[in-house]
Amino acid sequence: MNRLLFLLGATLAVSCALAQTWPSKPIQIVIPFGPGAASDMVSRRLAEKLQASLGQPVIVINKAGASGQIAAEQVVKASPDGYTLFLTSNTTHSANPFLYKKLAYDPVKDFTPIARVCDFPFVLVVDAKLPIKSVKELIAYSRNSGGKSSYGFGNSTGQIAGAALSRLMQMDAAGVPYKSVPQVLTDLIGGQIQFAFLDMANAFPQMQAGKLRALAVSSEARSALTPGLPTIAEETGLRGFDLTAWGAVFGPAGLPKPIVDRLSSEITRIVTDPEFREKMQQIGVEIQSSTPEQLRQFVSQQLLVWGTKVKDAQIQPE
């Protein structure tokens, strides 16, 4: 018993000492998607603000591939010292456990929750050159395409939404995976694929340029960012069709509580600042915030939600 108390006391002392000197060198934020992805946009703006408040460089590291597994594994293996953070989404922490038979990480046990950051509303878009102006017209187009209709996705939300709509509406459409959303955009505008569910942060500029046509939002209710766009449920009668991605910051398991509390406080202060919130809304991102414990509970709840969504879309795990 005395030895156990000694070890616990020594561990606590080391953690406190580490927290008192932290940060003393550059911090990296690993994200599971490529440059230009919505999480990349948010990470870079957050990194800029954190750098100013923490007094150390904060560098964004893009690790796209394998639906975020490469990035997740890198963070899991990192030292829990506050110098490696993970700004990730429901792809790695909610959907992957049901999209893959085996994962090299556990979204609950292998990470320290720090703070929620945002939601990424999604919109169903088509190549503006196609004669499709509604969800019903897209469904008819796909059914009559002779197997030549396809949708692209660069994250789990786009994958599950596309698969669910195609199955439920009996569309003849194939899903095409990409490493990241910007690559989906390129092929969609180029005519290699016909439609996609994209986060608004990536879709907005192309919608405004007239290259993409928005048909509906994937959330249960209309988005305040695009109040004129109907929901998938409104267009199809598919009640319960509700897919919105989320973003949050984690560290490796075992991150000392003083560092967690400091990071959570700084991140919450940044994202709830009216100026930061407004800038995020302008690019199609809705701000959220939480305590570490609230994020822990949220992740557990979202595993149940996304497990059901994958099952309903009848996606077989790889």
Image (spheres, grey):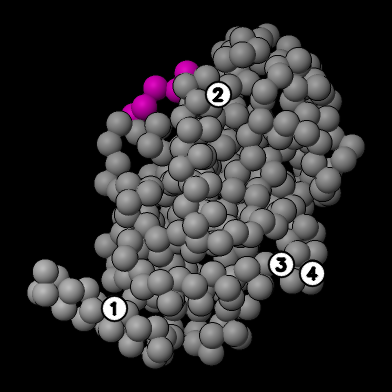
Helix, strand or loop status at disc 3: loop
Q: Is residue 50 above or below residue 190?
A: below
Mark 2 lies on a secondary structure that is: helix
Cβ atoms at labels 2 and 4 below 8 Å apart: no
Q: Secondary structure at mark 1?
A: helix
Residue visible at 79% across and 69% down in the picture? 274
Amino acid type, mark 4: Pro
Q: Which residue is mark 2?
A: 163
In the displayed structure, does residue 139 sit left or right of residue 255? right
Question: Mainly helix, strand or loop, the magenta region?
Answer: loop
- Marks 3 & 4, CB-CB < 8 Å contact: no
Q: Compared to 314, does 203 lie above or below?
A: below
Q: Is residue 127 visible?
A: no
**What is the quadrant of the N terminus in the image?**
bottom left
The tag earlier along the polypeptide, 3 or 2, is 2
Q: At label 3, which amino acid type do we have?
A: Thr
Element at label 4:
helix
Place of residue 84 in the rendered image (x, y in percent of width and height, measured from the top left): 39, 71
Q: Earlier in the sequence, mark 2 or mark 1?
A: 1
Q: Nearer the viewer, residue 56 or 13?
A: 13
- Residue span colored magenta: 314-318
Question: What numbered label is drawn on residue 256?
Answer: none
Q: Quadrant of residue 210?
A: top right
Report how far apart the C-alphas of labels 3 and 4 lie in the structure.
6 Å
Q: Residues within 10 Å of mark 1 (few under 14, many from 20)?
A: some
Q: Going from the N terminus, do you reach mark 2 or mark 4 first? A: 2
